[in-house]
Amino acid sequence: MDEYAISLLLIALSALFSGLTLGYFTLNTQNLRRQAKLGNKEAINILPIREKGNQLLTTLLFGNVAVNAALSVYLSSLAGGVVAALSATVLIFLFGEIIPQAVLSRHAMKFGSMAAPFVKILIFMLAPITFPIAWTLDRFLGQEIPSMYSKNEIMEIVSEHEDSEHSPIDEDEERIIHGALQFSHTTVREVMTPKDKVRMYEENQRLTDPFFEEVTELGFSRYPVYSGNRENITGILFTKDLLVEEDDIAIKETHEAFGSQFLTVRQSDKLDTVLACMLKQNLHMGIVRNRKKIFMGVITLEDIIEEIIQQEIVDEDDEEVM
């Protein structure tokens, strides 16, 4: 009975070392740090061990090799040379390598956390042997290279999560995340309203009843204002402030509705840059000009938000599309 018990113990230790080696090193240190910050107890238990990458590796491999060697020697003392070699090979291959690695690769966090106290003790006990080797590896190989993902890879990861029944990410969140990752590569030219579709008013336009009816019918909150010709933009008309203005005065004579400060952007500007300028200057509309300072159109904060959320914003004043 003692022979079987010792054999089972050695096989169990071989399985433990083999499974933990694969399990721990399938866990990325960056992911563990992120999960530990979010309060994941399993990640908190594993992180101090996993951060000692080369020392953890040498400790587990040393233990695995030592146990497998002891198992081979012990079996050879119980049986003949060929039988012992075959028995050791089958037992180590099947129960010491394949099964534990298959199991722990799928449940690395759970088993890694449970085994953390044992591994910490083992690292301390074997430090006189493993530390010099790990220190040498650290000096020659350096720290582990962090895993960085491109924006396209992150978008694909989000899509995979949305498609999985185990993920809380829904279709709306996927769309918005994709838009947020893409809008910094989108230029003003791609989303602006071209000048031939922009409704503008001359600064001497008087606040008459037909004017108020037209503004109400159009339903926009802001209009570019020009002087003389449409290329000469002088400001922005804010329709919400027209209510407090006197009747039959020129736009440029209003006290609240006309603002001379406006943002000027170029067609090649990226949307993230324009958004930052709008937020900093508290402006919701930008006048788009080309390199020759020619007026090309307008871009609004709403245009940028629509690009981020990948969906058109329809308010109560917009006509319903049938």
Image (spheres, helix red, strand yellow):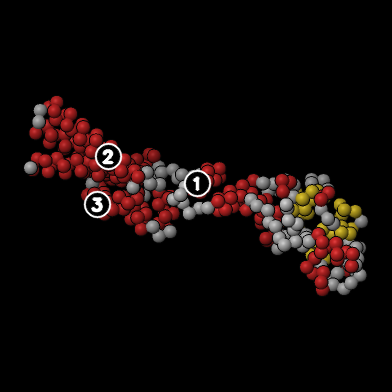
* Residue under the image location 89 percent in, 67 percent down: 209
Q: Which mark is residue 163?
A: 1
| In front of the other: 6 or 319 | 319
Of the two numbered discs 1 and 3 on the same chain, state the one appearing first in sequence.
Answer: 3
* Residue under the image location 43 percent in, 59 percent down: 38
Mark 1 crowd level (few <14, some 14–19, many ≥20, 10 Å Cα): some
In space, the residues marked 2 and 3 are separated at their CA atoms by 21 Å
In the rendered structure, the answer to whether residue 172 lies left or right of residue 231 reads left
Rendering coords of residue 232 (x, y %): 87, 54
Rendering coords of residue 270 (x, y %): 68, 48
**Element assignment for label 2:** helix
- Seen in the picture, residue 161 relative to 223 is either above or below; the reply is above
* Residue under the image location 81 percent in, 59 percent down: 218
Mark 3 crowd level (few <14, some 14–19, many ≥20, 10 Å Cα): few
Q: Residue type at mark 1? A: Asp
Q: Residue type at mark 3? A: Phe
Closer to the observer: label 2 or label 1? 1
In the rendered structure, the answer to whether residue 92 lies left or right of residue 34 reads left
Name the residue that disc number 2 marks. 99
Rendering coords of residue 60 (x, y %): 27, 43
Name the residue that disc number 3 marks. 118
Closer to the observer: label 1 or label 3? 1
Q: Residue type at mark 2? A: Ile
**Element assignment for label 3:** helix
Kindly give the residue lying farthest to the left in the view shown. Answer: 1
